[in-house]
Amino acid sequence: MDQNAKLTAIRQWLGTGSINIFGLPFSGRETTGRSLALALGAVYISGGEIIRHSGRQLSRTSLRTTNNGGLLPATDFENLILPYLKNETYRDYPLILDSVGRRMNEGHDTVDAAAAGGHPIKIAIVLNVSENEARNRWKISRLAHDRDDHLDDREERYLDERFALFRKETEPVIAAYRHDGILIAVHGNQERPAVVAEAIDKLYEFTQKHP
């Protein structure tokens, strides 16, 4: 079956549901997420996107935390991120979520909020990339200056903090999706088109096993 036919089947299966994508920093979440959103006629949503589009100013404490590689404080996640999943503008579209709900309690709340907004999370993807590979990608990115607007990418020590947070906070969230039987793993250490192609293949395989 060609890719267009697979995408058609995925769209029909997904409806207005959501796909949540996880992975280490520099695993390719944004690139993969945006590519899937374009292919599926979905809306790509990340915490950063929500903050930029909301027009809301974060507190100095929140800005300092996120700029230094930390996760958005719980109150901001509850008051800013979760309501966005119920945005009426996106009511008729599926959502591609970029690692929304990175802590266990946030993971549960994200599932509930997405369902309440008409976008139940039907599957999650984890992009498997080693920390060494992610660190190499960070170094290449720094030399290219292609993420200078991301303050939490400016120093390697912040990258180390983000790795530690991923292991402590996000890996249990991924494990919960796996336990629920709605997680697929994709090799993130391929060329970008190959990563997207594998994600589409595995999404299609999932739709055939879980109609």
Image (spheres, helix red, strand yellow):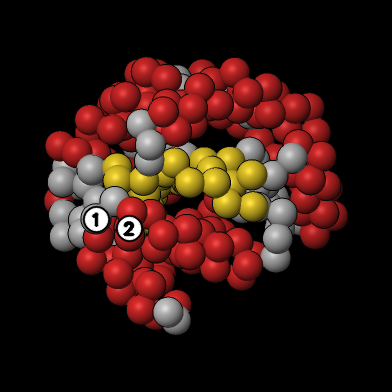
Mark 2 is surrounded, within 10 Å at the Cα level, by few (under 14), some (14 to 19) or many (20 or more) other residues, namely: some
Q: Position of residue 81 (x, y in %)?
A: 33, 34
Q: Residue at x 32, y 24 (%)?
A: 108
- Residue 30 is left or right of residue 10, and the answer is right
In this rendering, position of residue 113 left or right of residue 96: left
Q: Which mark is residue 207?
A: 2
Give the structural element (helix, strand or loop) at label 2: helix
Comparing 162 with 120, the one in front is 120
Q: Is residue 151 above or below residue 37?
A: above
**Residue 188 in the image, given as x and y percentages of width and height:** 65, 52
Closest to the observer, 83 or 42: 42
Q: Is residue 66 visible?
A: yes
Q: Is residue 209 above or below residue 64?
A: below
- Marks 2/1 in contact by CB < 8 Å: the verdict is yes
Q: Which quadrant, please, contains the N terminus?
A: bottom left
Residue at 36%, 72% in the rendered image: 7
Number of marks in picture: 2
The quadrant holding residue 151 is top right
Residue 52 in sight in this render: no
Compared across the picture, whether 120 is left or right of 46 comes to left
Q: Is residue 19 above or below residue 191?
A: above
Q: Amino acid at mark 2?
A: Thr
Which residue extends farthest front? 209
SS at mark 1 in the image: loop
| Residue for point 38% across, 41% down | 182
Numbered circle sitting on residue 211: 1
Q: Position of residue 120 (x, y in %)?
A: 23, 43
Q: CA distance from mark 2 to mark 1?
A: 5 Å
The residue depicted at 45 percent of the width and 33 percent of the height is 178
Which percent across, then down, holds residue 143? 84, 55
Q: Amino acid at mark 1?
A: Pro
